[in-house]
Amino acid sequence: MTDLPDLADFDDLAVQSDELGAQEQAVLSRLADADHDLEATALASNVFRVATAMRRRLEQAALRRAGLSWTAFKVLWVLWIWGERETRFVAVEADVTKGTLTGVVDTLAGRGLVVRRRHDDDRRLVSIALTDAGHDLITDTFPVFNAEERAIADLVAPDEQAALVRGLRHLVAALEEDAP
Amino acid sequence: MTDLPDLADFDDLAVQSDELGAQEQAVLSRLADADHDLEATALASNVFRVATAMRRRLEQAALRRAGLSWTAFKVLWVLWIWGERETRFVAVEADVTKGTLTGVVDTLAGRGLVVRRRHDDDRRLVSIALTDAGHDLITDTFPVFNAEERAIADLVAPDEQAALVRGLRHLVAALEEDAP
DNA sequence: GGGAAATCGGTTGGATCCAAACGATAGGCT
DNA sequence: AGCCTATCGTTTGGATCCAACCGATTTCCC
């Protein structure tokens, strides 16, 4: 097989702006002549790149030391915010399926961070609550997490940050309203 | 145990704007008195909510029918954009670890969608390429995926979409530059 | 030429993640 | 009272996901 080119070989691709990363440049090259919507791709791909980079930073800076996965943290946080809640509610708030939540709660319960309680009257329902250890862990971890959120937010100017939040809220609302 | 409150019980929480969802309202209630940066939380949480909702829509509308997971699709797409590439390159572009990529490529190779080739000269290296079947699948799937990206982008006004993309690109660049 | 360090892709162990199905339970209707 | 439908949380099967580690290979230095 012939020698494979280096990524740097693509620096000479025509671009719309020097803001674009190499991946977007390659996409332009590949798709520009075709019936593809690059602006739409730009929105989606940049949302995902931001989300992935932010999550990685937050996991490294705040969750690793606490030994928490992303979703485990979200579950503790939802219970901290809302108090003892039923499984179906926590799954919605943590944005995972009930099946996934069962597994994550198994892990947290195994560490003594949460407990499950069967509902007295409707025995289909199970509620989940933080233990003292779980409460201590989330109150220790959240400030570190929030400080890193602040550090990330400070990477852009205040007015741009506000504009981003506004636009993202509009998009979230529209996505949730437009859901089938 | 006492009756657990309904989610609707929280509608009376004081809020900054009727744009806020119930979760942001609960966060305000819980955290507003404490040493927490809600604006920073707003940026991060809205990025993640948009990313999760978009991914769900794109998976439902375009990837499910093709039987592709999110990362499987990304791998096919990266190989389609860049051509045959080494494992280390594809892992970076698809934004997963080499270990994860190995598993995903196992799955795709098992379906006859990609092949692995050992490098002639440097026998540490393995490159991955689309098969004809893989090429057909990505060229069939991507237009559907892109149309859904367009439908999502059209949920906000063109000027707001442009502002979002610009802000997100700045944040991506800043995050990647600020990485340790 | 030989040894040390670095890199590569893959393996290990354990956790997450989903859709679909299941058993248990509740509510409505006849 | 009995049957049917719906809901709940869990289980199943299989895929993804990571950090850490491993064997194989390459490169560099003495």
Image (cartoon, coloured by chain):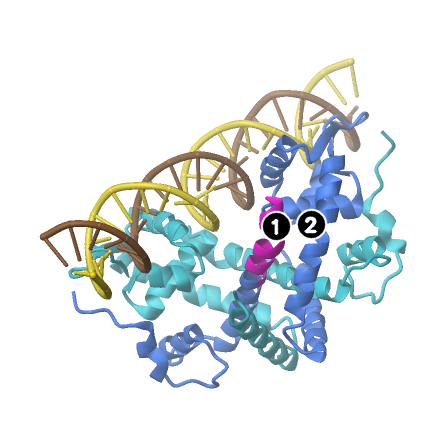
Chain colours: A cyan, B blue, C yellow, D brown
Look at mark 2 in the image and give the residue it sits on.
B141
Q: Position of residue C19 (x, y in %)?
A: 47, 48
Q: Position of residue B49 (x, y in %)?
A: 52, 66
Q: Label 2 to label 1, Cα distance in Å?
A: 7 Å
Q: The numbered mark 2 sits on a residue in which chain?
A: B
Q: Is residue B27 left or right of residue A123?
A: right
Which label belongs to residue B63? Answer: 1
Q: Amino acid at mark 1?
A: Leu
Nearer to us in this view, A146 or C29: C29
Mark 2 and mark 1 in contact? Answer it, CB < 8 Å. Answer: yes
- Residue in the image at 54% along x and 63% along y: B53
Decide if residue B19 is in sight here.
Answer: yes
- Mark 2 and mark 1 lie on one chain; the one further toward the N terminus is 1
Is residue B59 found inside the magenta-colored segment of the image?
Answer: yes
At label 1, counting other C-alpha atoms closer than 10 Å, the crowd grade (few under 14, some 14-19, many 20 or more) is: many
Locate the N terminus of chain B by quadrant: bottom left
- Residue in the image at 63% along x and 33% along y: B111
User: In the rendered structure, which segment of residues is drawn in magenta?
Assistant: B54-67
Q: Amino acid at mark 2?
A: Thr
Q: The numbered mark 1 sits on a residue in which chain?
A: B
